[in-house]
Amino acid sequence: MIPGHQPVLLREVLGFLAPADGGRYLDCTFGGGGHSRAILESARDVHLVAIDRDPEAAPRAEALAAEFPGRFKLIDRDFGRLGGVADSDFDGILFDFGLSSFQLDDPGRGFSFRADGHADMRLDPRAGVPAARWLETATEEMLARAVRDFGEETHWRRVVRSLLAARGTGKLERTSSLADVISGAIPARDRRTSRIHPATRSFQGIRIAVNDEIGAIERALPAAFDKLRPKGVLCAISFHSLEDRPVKQFFRRMSGQPESSDDATPQDLRTRLAEPLTRRPITPSDAEIESNPRSRSAKLRAIKKL
């Protein structure tokens, strides 16, 4: 285990992937490397390809490559561009859409307001623009989509107005002052009664917008399915409804099931390409939540390619 990092739902992931001797696996979200390490250790001569767009994952990957020579490699890439990766014919593929502990705990990355830092929020600091600059230049509709749709913030209108009013003041540059701007837009009664910090939802929405996280998931899932061997298993761990929804819909579509209650496609027009391994999402045990509170909202879904 890498210090400071606990892979979520590890036992359950290994149960579905069931790594076999000589198997080939793909970890699309390397992060702290906990899942990758466990897969490599679970059977003889397992080969694993990992993907991560965060350049800070490289040193952790180098250590793993040295420990498992010839069996592991990291591809420096956004998993939203998985279709351009040449490797294929995997026995199992994993997505873990949560941020790694390394990203959350580094104030300089700007993902959290627990400690003050530059409001960057980019998963790949080499690409795109920092959240602070995005907040200064995004259209009102882009801000509304981030806070309302991606953050699922009830008071999104008030938050968007506050963000627009704070432009040019420097308050959008730092995570602490940005959190204050957002919190100040939330009605006092809701701030007092909320179980989470009043800026939490908006921070999530801004981060998702800056990194195009939902679009990346929607592009990556079909690309991953194409790279599976027959009887290969695809696992996905999500941490909120916006991530879980495209996973659920794609898995149901591949399994020949209605994607939602609004899906009226006749059954004889559906194509069944996979077998669902989870009728309902798998969630962490009480013991795991106690040892790793960040796992609380995790949901694991899995399908097997026919």
Image (cartoon, rainbow, N blue to C red):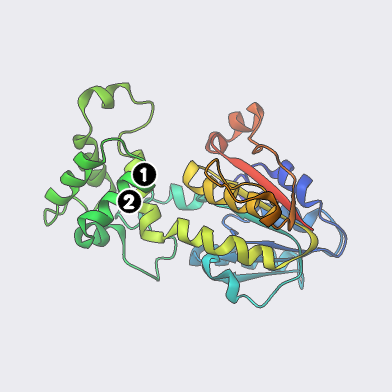
Q: Which residue is more in the foreground, 260 or 48?
A: 260
Residue located at (54% from left, 51% from top): 246
Please state if 205 lies on the left or on the right of 87 as rendered.
Answer: left
| Residue 70 in the image: above or below residue 221 | below
Mark 2 or 1 closer to N-term? 2
| Residue 286 drawn at (x, y percent) | 63, 27
Marks 2 and 1 close (CB-CB < 8 Å): yes
Residue named by callout 2: 146
Choose top left, top right, bottom left or bottom right for residue 181: top left
Label placed on residue 303: none
Q: Which residue is more in the foreground, 44 or 160?
A: 160
Secondary structure of the residue carrying tag 1 is loop
Residue named by callout 1: 151
| Residue 183 drawn at (x, y percent) | 24, 36
Please state if 167 lies on the left or on the right of 201 as rendered.
Answer: left
* Label 2 Cα neighbours within 10 Å, binned few <14 / some 14-19 / many ≥20: many
| Residue 74 in the image: above or below residue 117 | below
Please state if 207 lies on the left or on the right of 100 as rendered.
Answer: left
The amino acid type, in three-letter code, at marker 2 is Ala
Residue located at (27% from left, 49% from top): 144
Secondary structure of the residue carrying tag 2 is helix
- State the separation of the CA atoms marked 2 and 1: 6 Å
Q: Which residue is more in the foreground, 23 or 105?
A: 23
State which quarter of the image contains the C terminus. bottom right
